[in-house]
Amino acid sequence: MSKSWQISRRTALKGLGTALALPLLDAMRPGLMLAAEGTPAATTAAPLRAAFLYVPNGVNMQHWTPATTGADYVLPSILEPLAELKSDFSVLSGLDQLKAAANGDGAGDHARALATFLTGTQARKTDGADIRAGVSVDQLAAKHLGRVTRFPSLEIGVDIGARSGNCDSGYSCAYSSSMAWKSETQPLTKDNDPKQVFERLFAQGQPDETAAARAKRELYNKSILDFVMDDAQRLKKQLGGNDQRKMDEYLTAVRELEVRINRADRMPAAATAAEFKKPTGIPASNEEHLRILGDLMVLAFQGDVTRVCTYIFANEGSNKSYPFIEVPEGHHELSHHQKNADKLAKIAKINTFHIRQLAYILQKMKATQEGEGNLLDNSMLVYGSGIGDGDAHNHDNLPILLAGKGGGTIKQGRHMKFDDRRPLTNLYLSMLDRLGVPTVEHLGDSSGRLTGLDV
């Protein structure tokens, strides 16, 4: 490869109705080539990403919260699946979302928990069309970062959920199924169908062109890669050895995910609420569903298709059962445990199962080389719930993890405890600063930036 040759960060592999984004290559980083010639130059930094992952109904706090603070803390049992990643995340205790409390509005903690989680605002109690919360942190980031990516943000989750009606003590179903709010009155619908997400991320052109391309691929049992392979081969001839390896790894990951999604089409149908039409491509296995959606998020970040994602593991108040981990009872039912030891043990099993899915995502991101580090290094992921203990329905001292090093701006591997009822939204303001979003002074109930993340 010529030392002066470079390609745009926006380059994509193209074919019929298809545009496959590329990962960050050395050829997109002119500083590397100049440095090879002995000329001082700053390399092109990898972009920063932000993801917000939500689990419902709180957690078993006794087996979530570390006994000590600092770097030498011992992982509690629920977090043990993250043992190999301990230096890549921190446990943040003492953060609150008090606008999710009743504050005079009575029952409805589950709906408020999710609606408030990223907005920090009190959701209007209504089951009609006059819903209102606030603009969520992900959408503040998307408004700025979305100018340079194909999609401003990605909203995914295992459950669809109703968009209207009464789902929680007089609160609209929109509250308990939506985490991303583009405006005070506009929650964003998430997608739970891996096949539809895949097509959305990697298709281009007019809708009829996209449908035609998809129909042709399915008719001839073609991979999306078959449509872009000629373009890929032309580009690879101009790349250095390291970039060729990166491209091969990325294309292999795309193909493997495509195979898994197509296999899901042939599996027995997953249980779906009777009032909803089942989309195609929903895996029968809850774990496989969670992992495929996680893989799609990782690929979207890797190809810089988007830099912002919200991912709901299950809608707030979900009564999903988990018989495959010996929990046949409903999650929400169990969360009202009244300190029953058997119920608490089963809640811990569900919590640990969800943490295993988080570990899967983080490990995949850490294994994805990017620039001088990896995809996880260049990301920030918040994982947690808007409820602490499911029986108490409290919204203080929430179970929150922060993973990723924010491009080297966050020191990880600690248990940090905040004792002065610090709003969770303070963390979000600090994240927006790192993402380069023009200064946001307030978000919901924020009281300032969350300090100490970089020391």
Image (cartoon, rainbow, N blue to C red):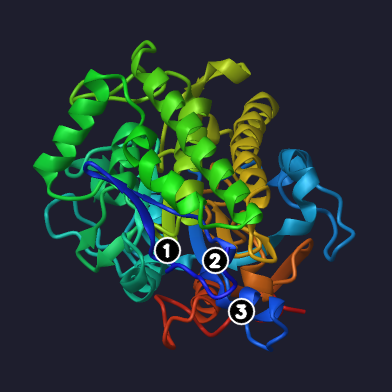
**Which quadrant of the figure contains the N terminus?**
bottom right
Answer with the quarter of the image where residue 215 lies: top left
Looking at the picture, which amino acid does disc 1 mark? Answer: Leu
Q: Identify the mark nearer the N-term, 3 or 1.
A: 3
How many other residues sit within 10 Å of disc 2, few (<14), some (14-19) or many (≥20)?
many
Q: Which residue is mark 1?
A: 118
Tell whether 75 sits left or right of 196: right
Between 405 and 64, the one nearer to me in the picture:
405
Q: Mark 3 = which residue? A: 31
Q: Residue at x 72, y 60 (%)?
A: 90
Q: Return the residue nearer the eye: 429 or 269.
A: 269
Q: CA distance from mark 3 to mark 2?
A: 9 Å
Q: Secondary structure at mark 2?
A: helix
The reply, left or right, for residue 63 in relation to residue 22 is: right
Q: Is residue 108 visible?
A: no
**Left or right of residue 368: residue 174:** left
Residue at image coords 26%, 27%? 217
| Mark 3 vs mark 1, CA separation in Å | 37 Å
Q: Could you tell me if the residues under marks 1 and 2 are in contact, i.e. CB atoms within 8 Å? A: no
In this view, the mark in front (1 or 2): 2
Q: Nearer the viewer, residue 128 or 270?
A: 270
Q: Quadrant of the C terminus?
A: bottom right
Q: Earlier in the sequence, mark 1 or mark 2?
A: 2
Q: Name the element at disc 3.
A: helix
- Local packing at callout 3 (Cα closer than 10 Å; few below 14, some 14-19, many 20+) is some
How packed mark 1 is, by other alpha carbons closer than 10 Å (few <14, some 14-19, many 20 or more), is many
Amino acid carrying mark 2 in the image: Ala
Q: Which mark is residue 27?
A: 2
For the question of whether residue 295 can be seen, the reply is yes
Q: Nearer the viewer, residue 17 or 117?
A: 17
Which amino acid does the dot numbered 3 rest on?
Answer: Gly
Residue 189: % across, % down: 26, 49
